[in-house]
Amino acid sequence: MLRTHTCGELRIEHINESVTLCGWVQKVRDKGGMLWVDLRDRYGITQLLFEEGSTAEELLTTARSLGREFVIKASGVVTERYAKNENIATGDIEIKVESLDILNASEVPPFIIEDKTDGGEDLRMKYRYLDLRRNEVREKLQLRSRLAIATRNYLANEGFIEVETPVLIKSTPEGARDFVVPSRMNPGEFYALPQSPQTFKQLLMVSGLDRYFQIVKCFRDEDLRADRQPEFTQIDCEMAFVTREDILGMFEQMVRSLFKEIKGIEFTEFPMMTYAEAMKRYGSDKPDIRFEMEFVELNEVARNKGFNVFDQAELVVGICAKGCAEYTRKQLDALTDFVRRPQIGAKGLVYAKCNADGSFKSSVDKFYNQEDLKTWAEAAGAQSGDLLLVLSGKTNQVRKQLNELRLHLGTELGLRDNDVYKPLWVVDFPLLELDEETGQYHAMHHPFTSPKKEDFDMLDESPGEVRANAYDMVINGVEIGGGSIRIHDRATQQLMFKHLGFTEDEAKAQFGFLMDAFEYGAPPHGGIAFGFDRLCAMFGGTESIRDYIAFPKNTSGRDVMIDSPSPIAEEQLVELGVKLR
Amino acid sequence: MLRTHTCGELRIEHINESVTLCGWVQKVRDKGGMLWVDLRDRYGITQLLFEEGSTAEELLTTARSLGREFVIKASGVVTERYAKNENIATGDIEIKVESLDILNASEVPPFIIEDKTDGGEDLRMKYRYLDLRRNEVREKLQLRSRLAIATRNYLANEGFIEVETPVLIKSTPEGARDFVVPSRMNPGEFYALPQSPQTFKQLLMVSGLDRYFQIVKCFRDEDLRADRQPEFTQIDCEMAFVTREDILGMFEQMVRSLFKEIKGIEFTEFPMMTYAEAMKRYGSDKPDIRFEMEFVELNEVARNKGFNVFDQAELVVGICAKGCAEYTRKQLDALTDFVRRPQIGAKGLVYAKCNADGSFKSSVDKFYNQEDLKTWAEAAGAQSGDLLLVLSGKTNQVRKQLNELRLHLGTELGLRDNDVYKPLWVVDFPLLELDEETGQYHAMHHPFTSPKKEDFDMLDESPGEVRANAYDMVINGVEIGGGSIRIHDRATQQLMFKHLGFTEDEAKAQFGFLMDAFEYGAPPHGGIAFGFDRLCAMFGGTESIRDYIAFPKNTSGRDVMIDSPSPIAEEQLVELGVKLR
């Protein structure tokens, strides 16, 4: 190594040792007679000292020529510092430099390489290699690396075999869009990049691998919302001869173990809730249960009092904001504006304050007297000082709207602490979802999810009511994983494809290999996949996944650093047998 | 779990326990009064017993209906076997079955699921999920999984951070062919799949990550030889502030540690050889040093004796086959035919036998007398009973030819034992290779490899003689890894591109981001990449990599199981902005 030590390693016990360090110039302080350089590498910062009189003139000149981000190699003797710096691990010592090499100069960087930088998002993405020098960004990649290793070791210890499934697979019209790859050797034909290794991991179960996992890149060519990436990483797992409880148990244990190992957090509870219950209590299939503020259905007490809006609503439902009775008109208007935003789409918001003196004040006092409002408060378990917020409308819509309001209030009231983690299983999702435009059912999860046995008979008559043997792991309102017990026989799989509107030929052309495999002794099996980027962000205590990806793409799917995608040469197109439209 | 134990787990101490097993029917033996079923899963085989009289009639009927590869669940009591089977770990016991469920029936499989199968390659690839049920295939995937975990843990312990680099990158005309991916969001533009994460790992060094690794899929759209795959896996590594010796030391240690952990083998030696020496002594840049049979250059002793062929040759070079003086005319002719095959292309083969009586017999006795031949033998260190085999011609060609002959003889003489492992570093490769057709130089490794400092001045005048600071790890004649110390400054990188025939604009368009990065404090760095598929095959003691890949493609790049690549829908092409030619 060009160095004897890293910049994070030297302590008081190294005094008088001759050492060589390499790193980047973080800062130069020139006080005339003395000159200090903060030398930085991945491991820390060490102070270098150059002193007029004792340091050779030539060395001093070189030191004075150093700019930010120069890469240097410095040798010298470890010395105790006069003024110690308790903020850094090497703060007791400095290096009296005896020789200095500039290994590489640096232009002035386009933004400051410090925790607080002056660089905007676009600039930092263009110079991502400089952004990655900042501690807070690098630490996110280090966290990701640790999480990946810990996950793999956990699963390997549980007997899972890591198998790499192919990246060049077959395009299927199902679901979100495939990226495709023209085949030079097979002109007119294309590979697709996998949206997930779903069918392959099922085939591995058919092959008797028993327990499979993979941390694997997946691809989805869809319009990117702020926090989606065209390529993303999954922890993909599958087990044979299991019931739902085996999967939940195994992966609850895995996530518990990761939280313990990486964050020192032990979960006391890991509750389970059905989809139906989650929708009723929180208006969401991924409820944030760090705080209560559960939904209270008020149909019984709020209808038939002459308030037309409620009377005509399918559902009147509210939440109780503890201690918010003193909210001002302005605050209440802001909440009303919040729910009326087009993304949320409520028509209005009804409130009822439970005043400290036991009286009530609502926005619908015209229709509801004190006694009426008291029954609301009782239904909602509201106390003096609390604020009831009520929406009404079609059940599904109003639940979604109230969920947004609940989360918004939770954030506003500081109830969503990033250092608190509340995991949850949500189970028994609907198997199928009706596309109201086309009248066609879609698989809510994917077409390989098995219906619950007890609902199987409803598949023909009321497909929308059939529950799937599917489950999601939710932490703090974020879905970090999901899976299901799979269909493992040809007949059920064919029936499923039929309900999804596949002709027999289509089903065969696209998934014939899987249905064939089911005829050669496919075991019962099920699995789960975790969004690894999201899991990393969760462990990092932040919302955006982008920072946990070394070289992310922007919302147009571009890598602005390497300027990709880009046009390719005409000869290349000819070779591939395609041309541009 | 549907089972209480696996099929590999029960022993004599489990006797009288009630257990439930799941698995595949390997074999049914029906002896009338008694019926045995061998039940198989990933973990082993357990024998099930059904006995007329003590087993319920209904159960017996079900048992008699079982076919090969049916998936069943059987419960019963562990019993000591009358006739023990020492070949399997569960051979002391059997299960007296009390209940039996057929979890899934099976068609008769298209080939026998046993170590020795009757299935041809094509059939096994089409039904790869059945092929993977065979122990010997599954064990290869398990070996791969263990190797991956061990590699990751080794590198993580050495402070390497695992970073996922992007799969959707930028196409460059350099080197072998890119697979490309049309971008729907950026019509007319394409991503490329990486042939290696080379530039990204260098950027990670610029970013100060210090030590990076990744086990990563790479892609190459080239005509597939028997043992190439369009997608393959690398162990990709890079370190900053290193010299060549640091890289060699680190990765020699890694490979030593893997061999010790996985195979219980400790290397006594790990020699280093220059490219020039390897070519001179073995005619190959990846010599198999499990056996000696080194090249002996005979120019001095074999020329100027009137034998025109040798006199006009640039190089006369031979090998000594120990103890082969008794080779028959037929054997010698076979060797001559071997070197005259068009793939090898020698014109003929000269031999000289060192007879037991001290005399010599050669195919060129007309030109060389006993005394002459004695000088050959002395030069070659040949003893009585040995056989000298001599080729001549242009240096590079004749070395390649003799290398083939040496390997062929080594195999024939049983000198290449698959259980013996001899590692080796080959260093100081040429930086550039002349394409004799175009007169253009190509990078032998890739354009980011640094020239050796002491050769740098020759770059303009004799580029072909400049040595690269590059190295390969070779085991048993197979290159399993290679790398180099990289260029880390813009000026040298530009010079390199110039020598490779890039215009300044081309260099900037394709690699501008990397050269820009070099201007912001790029540290000296270097790295290595191992072919993971090949490493697995090496550990498995076989030559073909295909068996170590769960779902390989055939030599036309097809996955015959899922039938990919395949045509895609016209609408999809429209969306992507391309059409077929």
Image: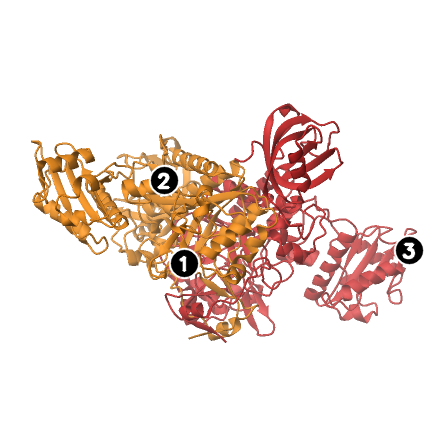
Chain colours: A red, B orange
Badge number at residue B176: 1
Q: Specify the amino acid type for callout 2.
A: Thr
Using the image as rendered, state which of residue B539 and residue A16 is in the foreground. A16
Q: Are marks 2 and 3 on the same chain?
A: no
The local secondary structure at tag 2 comes to strand
Which chain does the numbered disc 1 sit on?
Answer: B
x and y percentages locating residue A4 in the rendered image: 56, 31
**Whether residue A425 is visible:** no
Which chain does the numbered disc 3 sit on?
Answer: A
Q: Could you tell me how far apart the alpha carbons at marks 1 and 2 are, in whole angstroms?
A: 26 Å
Note whether B441 is above or below A567 in the view shown: above
Label 2: how many residues lie within 10 Å, few (<14), some (14-19) or many (20+)? some
| Mark positioned earlier in the residue sequence (1 or 2) | 1
Label 3: how many residues lie within 10 Å, few (<14), some (14-19) or many (20+)? few
In this rendering, the label closer to the viewer, 2 or 3: 2
Using the image as rendered, state which of residue A480 and residue A318 is in the foreground. A480
Badge number at residue A216: none
Left/right placement of residue A350 relative to residue A444 reads right
Q: Which residue is mark 3?
A: A359
What residue appears at the point 45 percent right and 55 percent down from the top-left corner? Answer: B499
Note whether B566 is above or below B21 in the view shown: below
Using the image as rendered, state which of residue A407 and residue B527 is in the foreground. B527
Q: Specify the amino acid type for callout 1.
A: Ala
Extreme residue toward the right, this view: A357
Q: Could you tell me how far apart the alpha carbons at marks 2 and 3 are, in whole angstroms?
A: 93 Å
Quarter of image, res A515 = bottom left
Q: Which residue is mark 2?
A: B274
In this rendering, the label closer to the viewer, 1 or 3: 1
**Whether residue B23 is visible:** yes
Q: Specify the amino acid type for callout 3.
A: Ser
What residue appears at the point 70 percent right and 41 percent down from the top-left corner? Answer: A27
The local secondary structure at tag 3 comes to loop
